[in-house]
Image (cartoon, rainbow, N blue to C red):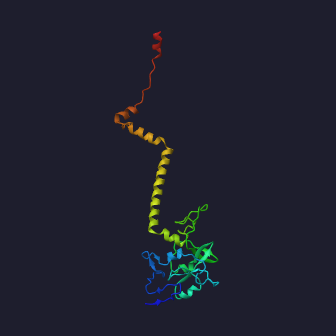
């Protein structure tokens, strides 16, 4: 068993490297192997704050995260206590935390999450960025926060992917789609009924009216019979009458 002991005055806890269960891409299994153990702590961590242990240094801004320790944001000086660990750098864009695709895709499947190019680097956002109203002509939005997306993506951030692929979210989405389908069906039926108000009345009247009996051979011959040519009385008969 390999242990890295840390001084009691150090802010870093003792690490037990052997007890880590490494998952495919390098993360620790959580939620039955669905997500790495470090993912949720990463998304809930506040970055770009001053390091409590190196406040006197000009490099005290906390923009690093150790995937093996998951003990909060770190500054560049803190990394001296995490040699050999998997540390990733967090960047910021428009007051939102992002991470480079080249770093995160080594340890996490980001399929379905939209990527952006910022400062010539492709990045993904860590957490959702709600959008009050999608822009005009938008045909695809994030399944969680409704932010406008390109058609080939489902989520706007890693956090939205976790939420959107959870079993609870899938159940809610299934129920919502079912209700929507029922509402559309009822609406279509109501529209047809309102556009043809006499249909039901005609149907009811028709049901109480006896149907016309099928034609028989006798009726067919009667219908086909033509009247004879009328004959006028002879002219001589009229003269005798006077």
Q: Nearer the viewer, residue 236 or 161?
A: 161
Tell me the quadrant of the picture where the N terminus can be found: bottom left
Please report the residue visible at 40 percent of the width from the left and 33 percent of the height from the top.
223
Taking 16 as reference, is 199 above or below it? above
Q: Nearer the viewer, residue 12 or 65?
A: 12
- Judging depth in this view, the residue of 204 and 231 nearest the camera is 204
Query: Picture coordinates of residue 75 (x, y %)?
Result: 59, 83
- Identify the residue at image location x=34%, y=33%: 218
194 over 91 or under it: above or below: above
Up the image or down, 182 lies above or below 166; here it is above
Q: Position of residue 132 (x, y in %)?
A: 59, 62
Q: Quadrant of residue 119?
A: bottom right
Residue drawn at (44%, 42%) of the image: 200
Q: Residue furthest top?
A: 242
Q: Is residue 193 left or right of residue 215?
A: right
Q: Position of residue 219 (x, y in %)?
A: 36, 33
Relative side of 62 to 242, left or right: right
Residue 109 falls left or right of residue 58? left
Give residue 48's quadrant in the image: bottom right
Q: Quadrant of residue 131?
A: bottom right
Residue 128: image location, x then y, percent: 55, 69
């Amino acid at each position: 068993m390999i242990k890295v002991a840390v001084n009691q005055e150090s802010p870093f806890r003792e690490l037990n490297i052997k007890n880590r269960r490494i998952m495919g891409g390098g993360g620790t299994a959580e939620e039955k192997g669905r997500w790495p153990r470090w993912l949720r702590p990463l998304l809930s961590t506040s970055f770009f704050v001053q390091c409590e242990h190196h406040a006197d240094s000009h490099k005290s801004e906390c923009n690093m995260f150790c995937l093996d320790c998951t003990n909060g944001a770190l500054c560049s000086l803190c990394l001296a206590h995490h040699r050999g660990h998997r540390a990733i750098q967090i960047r910021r864009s428009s007051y939102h935390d992002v991470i480079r695709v080249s770093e995160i895709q080594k340890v996490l499947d980001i399929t379905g999450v939209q990527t952006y190019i910022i400062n010539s680097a492709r990045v993904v956002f860590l957490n959702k960025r709600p959008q009050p109203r999608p822009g005009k002509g938008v045909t695809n939005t994030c399944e969680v926060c409704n932010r406008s997306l390109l058609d080939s993506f489902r989520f706007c951030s890693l956090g939205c992917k976790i939420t959107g692929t959870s079993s609870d979210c899938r159940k809610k989405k299934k129920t919502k789609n079912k209700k929507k389908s029922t509402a559309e069906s009822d609406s279509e039926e109501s529209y047809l009924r309102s556009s043809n108000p006499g249909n039901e009345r005609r149907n009811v009247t028709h049901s109480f009216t006896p149907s016309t009996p099928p034609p028989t051979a006798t009726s067919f011959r009667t219908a086909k019979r033509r009247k004879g040519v009328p004959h006028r009385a002879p002219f001589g008969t009229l003269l005798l009458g006077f």
